[in-house]
Image: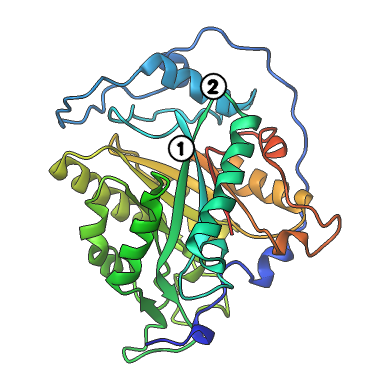
Amino acid sequence: MISIKNILVVGTLVAFSNLLIACGNEPKLKHQVVVDSVKLGLDTTKVSPLKQAIKPLDTIKYNQKLISLANGDTSGRWPVKQQPYPLASAILPFKRVVAYYGNLYSKKMGILGEFPPNEMLARLDVEVKRWEKADPETTVQPALHYIAVVAQGDPGKDGKYRYRMPDKQIDSVLSIAKKRDAIVFLDIQVALSDIHTELPLLEKYLKLPQVHLGIDPEFSMKTGVKPGTKIGTYDAADINFCSNYLAKLVRENNLSPKIFLIHRFTKNMVTNSKSIKSHAEVQLVMHMDGWGEPDLKRGSYRYFIYMEPVQFAGFKLFYKNDLKKAPHHMMTPDELMKLRPRPIYVQYQ
């Protein structure tokens, strides 16, 4: 059994705090009434062969939600063009995912493991209500984002510097999530292993309709250095491997689209982003990770999420680390609603 002290604390690398980028304002766009797939550049030729005995996707509402998330952007980046419509019963963009992140072995890795389950869920309820108030037009989907493969300071028997959580721990998270009809994300920190090895080991869970995927480039140590000493990276080829894998699971098991989240807070954490492929079976979220003061976080969001659009955007908030520097303030839902694009996935650590 791994000791807690060997588990790396996620999100505290100093590289993020060295980013000194400010976010500029853009002119507002008047409300756009005409919304169609041609204007959004959506690719209607990518139709999944999966047959679903459920209500078809409301493409008009889908397009309207994309326009709303773009929040008046006039650059042409958002909404992202040439995207396939998702399969029916897709969560995004009809619902905003509000997630608690962490690991049951450690109180230091995030709010998910910091408090007993019932207290943790009560705190998540508070955040859900705040988002319902900030954006009453978008239903909130609660989620638990669990680090299922953890980068650690100990190399372990195979020298890969990662620890795979036992099934009983993942099962516990699923049971806790069921109390709130929450979806679950299983997050992978490969360390000196690789995503081709680690992802298939979670397949039995990813076949469940309520389970989705997250990967963390910060701890993908392709150069073989110890995790935590440098910031890692994933290429579009790694991301496409995961998307293809998820799309196949969805087709073969008649599932709703899977949400696939990629953490990011530097440019080199994700390379060749323009080569990332889209699927009707998978909804991609490029997630602005990292802690700091509001201006720093806005700048990072602008340069690493806004400037390199993939599909959907996410934003991470830290209850403690975001308060370390002046003005000692964690951004609110109302403040995040002013971003371009608006995040449709929000994570609390």
- The answer to whether residue 269 is above or below residue 184 is below
Is 211 positioned to the left or the right of 261 in the image? left
Kind of residue at badge 2: Ile
Where, by quadrant of the figure, is residue 158 drawn?
Answer: bottom left
In the structure shown, which secondary structural element does the residue marked by tag 2 occupy?
helix
- Tell me the residue at 48%/12% (across/down): 35
Question: x%, y% of residue 298?
Answer: 71, 46
Separation (CA) of disc 1 from disc 2: 13 Å
Where, by quadrant of the figure, is residue 282 drawn?
Answer: top left
- The answer to whether residue 248 is above or below residue 151 is above
Residue 222 visible in the shown view: no
The residue positioned farthest toward the front in the image shown: 118
Residue in front for this viewpoint, 140 or 344: 140
Residue in front for this viewpoint, 16 or 276: 16
**Residues packed near mark 1 inside 10 Å, few (<14), some (14 to 19) or many (20 plus):** many
Question: x%, y% of residue 339?
Answer: 67, 36
The residue that disc 2 covers is 67
The residue that disc 1 covers is 311
Is the C-beta separation of discs 1 and 2 under 8 Å?
Answer: no
Kind of residue at badge 1: Gln
The C terminus lies in quadrant: bottom right
Is 96 positioned to the left or the right of 334 in the image? left
**Residues packed near mark 2 inside 10 Å, few (<14), some (14 to 19) or many (20 plus):** many
- Tell me the residue at 75%/43% (across/down): 23
Question: x%, y% of residue 308?
Answer: 55, 43
Residue in front for this viewpoint, 300 or 330: 330
The residue positioned farthest toward the bottom in the image shown: 157
- Tell me the residue at 58%/80% (across/down): 229
Question: x%, y% of residue 196?
Answer: 27, 66
